[in-house]
Image (cartoon, grey):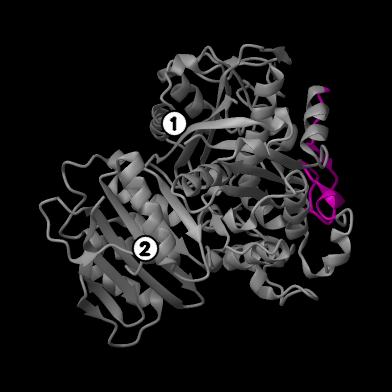
């Protein structure tokens, strides 16, 4: 059974539709900006903050139906993003639709509070957050919530693909989101993983990550007729997931887990590595992550494929990353245009990689590989094909 | 495909159980941390990383030790042939609250990597993978209550479509001193091990 991504949306500092985001990226705009010391964090830092874009009221008559105060900032972002996707498929059968939420920390801004106004304290729990979003859209089935650290978004896409091939549903809305919050900033700062300048994935002078916030939604379906925008249409050709079984907060030195995940993705897609045309890698710009990826891609003989990391545009958006970056992967595939990997000037990894230093035409692309790796030692890979 | 449960374990406020048999009772009705220490001494895994773990990971680790104590991941299954699929409700809330205390007051600011790295629910899966060299799919699903129907169908699909040989599945949740872990080792029913329980919608 072929399973497709048929519609999508991104809300990030670069815009509140996929097209706005992609056009901004083509122009070289960055969502990562200097944020002055203040309410977000006591020190100045580089990060991608979406501000009110996440919570502007919904368009149309939906706004009247919605008691907007009853939702948190992140839930509003999820609702806006999902509503944008559902608007493209007005006739979809909700009885055959399941919502799959990807998030690492959900409503983490509620932690330590007794609940704020119309939002109860229980919404700190991811299942309660997902249920609130599910109820907004009056979806009849319980939502599925995936929380696999930084691989959550790609995990959620692969879970959606499984739910459809198991026959549990025909369509799945995969929505990934996380906030830029003091909880996460203070944690990554104490790990000494945050760069004090815009991040530079794979570069010799890379000094760590920039964090970001975003929400992305993909509609995954076995019905290609739901697609109304060719740029958003893609075959989910295969996927794989693994664990390094090595360390909870650092990647394997050998790229073992990532190689297993990519190997499984190729096997399930029935493809050889040489049939891939492009890699959208994780590229967090930490020393260890980028080095691990370089070793894995080189060992897999994929080192010549054009490759980029989108972290310089969006920052690391945690549970949103796999979804948002998948959506941009699909855009690049369909437009035959690959984006520059921001921050890269000279190689700082031990194996050679073909990191994109400027936007590049790529009209003959057929298959693209998207990879992610995360805390807990987990890795995931998904292959998108031109549909 | 005909799958069966070849071992199961449970760790809760009353005690530690393996295949339905009580291994160690929490006779003193101890809170989790001291009781976990007792369970650790009883199982004696000799694993110094245990002492660094947060409550959720200790809970998941001990329940897995009990689960696999006699039936180590069978020798013919490679680590990549084993999947780990867990359900959880409260995420890493105990470590989350501890991390919160370290940054909420700017005059007393002391975030620690030793706490922060445990502020994700899937870290417990990572700890199990490291201990037992599991390199297959590991997924953490958050749900209000154990959803046997979902976990059963998902695991069944992994065996049928992705050729996994073994899967550790079940529920691990820790919140404010209340806790429960119940884990199941699922294998193809044809293996040379007795099936102790049926693997179906009601397995959990």
Q: Quarter-wise, where is residue A17 in the image?
A: top right
Asked if the residues shown at circle 2 and circle 1 are in contact, with their CB atoms under 8 angstroms apart, the answer is no
Report the Cα–Cα distance between label 2 and label 1.
Answer: 26 Å
Q: Is residue A146 above or below residue B28?
A: above
Q: Secondary structure at mark 2?
A: strand
Residue, x 81% and y 45% (percent of image)?
A44
Residue, x 74% and y 62% (percent of image)?
B106
Identify the mark at residue A233; answer none if there is no mark: none
Prevailing secondary structure class for the magenta stretch in the rendered image: loop
For the C terminus of chain A, the image quarter is: top right
Which region is colored magenta?
A27-55
Place of residue B52 in the rendered image (x, y in percent of width and height, measured from the top left): 41, 59
Q: Chain of mark 2?
A: B
Residue, x 37% and y 48% (percent of image)?
B157
- Viewer-closest of A181 and A84: A84
Q: Quarter-wise, where is residue B183 in the image?
A: bottom left
Left or right, A44 with reference to B39? right
Badge 1 local density, few (<14 within 10 Å), some, or many (20+)? many
Place of residue A107 in the rendered image (x, y in percent of width and height, measured from the top left): 68, 62
- Viewer-closest of A212 and B28: A212
Give the residue pinned by disc 2.
Answer: B170
Place of residue B16 in the rendered image (x, y in percent of width and height, measured from the top left): 27, 75
Residue A40 inside the magenta-drawn segment: yes
Identify the mark at residue A265; answer none if there is no mark: 1
Mark 2 on the same chain as mark 1: no
């Amino acid at each position: 059974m072929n399973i497709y991504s048929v519609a999508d949306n991104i809300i990030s500092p670069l815009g509140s539709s996929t097209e706005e985001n992609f056009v901004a990226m083509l122009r070289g705009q960055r969502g990562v900006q200097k944020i002055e010391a203040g309410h977000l964090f006591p020190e100045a830092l580089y990060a991608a903050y979406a501000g009110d874009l996440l919570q502007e009221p919904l368009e149309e008559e939906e706004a009247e139906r919605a008691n907007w105060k009853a939702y948190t900032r992140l839930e509003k972002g999820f609702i806006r993003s999902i509503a944008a996707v559902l608007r493209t498929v007005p006739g979809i059968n909700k009885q055959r639709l399941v919502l799959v939420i990807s998030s690492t920390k959900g409503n983490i801004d509620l932690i330590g509070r007794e609940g704020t106004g119309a939002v109860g304290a229980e919404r700190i729990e991811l299942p309660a957050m997902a249920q609130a979003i599910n109820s907004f859209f009056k979806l009849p089935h319980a939502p599925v919530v995936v929380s696999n650290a930084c691989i959550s978004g790609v995990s959620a896409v692969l879970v959606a693909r499984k739910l459809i091939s198991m026959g549990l549903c025909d369509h799945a809305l995969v929505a990934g989101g996380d906030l830029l919050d003091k909880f996460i900033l203070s944690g990554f700062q104490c790990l000494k993983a945050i760069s004090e300048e815009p991040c530079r994935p794979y570069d010799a002078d890379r000094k760590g990550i920039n964090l970001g916030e975003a929400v992305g939604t993909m509609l995954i379906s076995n019905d290609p007729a739901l697609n109304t925008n060719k740029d958003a249409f893609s075959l989910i050709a295969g996927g794989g997931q693994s664990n390094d079984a090595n360390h909870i907060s650092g990647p394997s030195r050998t790229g073992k887990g990532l190689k297993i995940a990519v190997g499984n993705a190729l096997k399930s897609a029935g493809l050889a590595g040489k049939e891939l045309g492009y890699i959208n890698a994780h590229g967090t710009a930490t020393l260890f992550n980028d080095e691990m990826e370089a070793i894995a891609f080189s060992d897999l003989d994929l080192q010549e494929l054009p490759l980029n990391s989108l972290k310089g545009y969006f920052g690391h958006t945690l549970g949103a990353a796999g979804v948002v970056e998948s959506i941009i992967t699909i855009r690049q595939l369909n437009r035959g245009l690959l984006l520059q990997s921001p921050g890269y000037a000279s190689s700082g990894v031990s194996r050679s990689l073909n990191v994109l230093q400027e936007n590049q035409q790529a009209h003959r692309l057929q298959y693209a590989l998207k990879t992610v790796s995360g805390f807990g030692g987990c890795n995931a890979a998904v292959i998108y094909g031109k549909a | 495909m005909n799958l069966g449960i070849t071992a199961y374990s449970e760790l809760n406020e009353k005690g530690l159980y393996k295949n339905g048999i009580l291994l160690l009772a929490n006779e003193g009705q101890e809170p989790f941390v001291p009781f976990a220490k007792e369970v650790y001494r009883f199982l004696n895994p000799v694993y110094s990383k245990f002492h660094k773990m947060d409550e959720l990971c200790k809970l998941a680790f001990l329940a897995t030790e009990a689960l696999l104590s006699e039936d180590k991941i069978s020798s013919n299954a490679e680590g990549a042939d084993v999947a780990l699929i867990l359900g959880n409700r409260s995420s890493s809330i105990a470590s989350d609250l501890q991390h919160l205390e370290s940054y909420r007051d700017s005059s007393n600011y002391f975030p620690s990597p030793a706490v922060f790295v445990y502020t994700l629910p899937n870290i417990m899966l990572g700890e199990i993978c490291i201990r037992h060299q599991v390199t297959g799919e590991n997924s953490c699903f958050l749900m209000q209550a154990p959803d046997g129907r979902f976990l059963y169908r998902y695991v069944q699909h992994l065996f049928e479509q992705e050729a996994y040989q073994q899967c550790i599945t079940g529920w691990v949740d820790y919140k404010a001193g209340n806790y429960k872990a119940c884990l199941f080792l699922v294998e193809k029913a044809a293996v040379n091990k007795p099936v102790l329980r049926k693997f179906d919608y009601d397995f959990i």
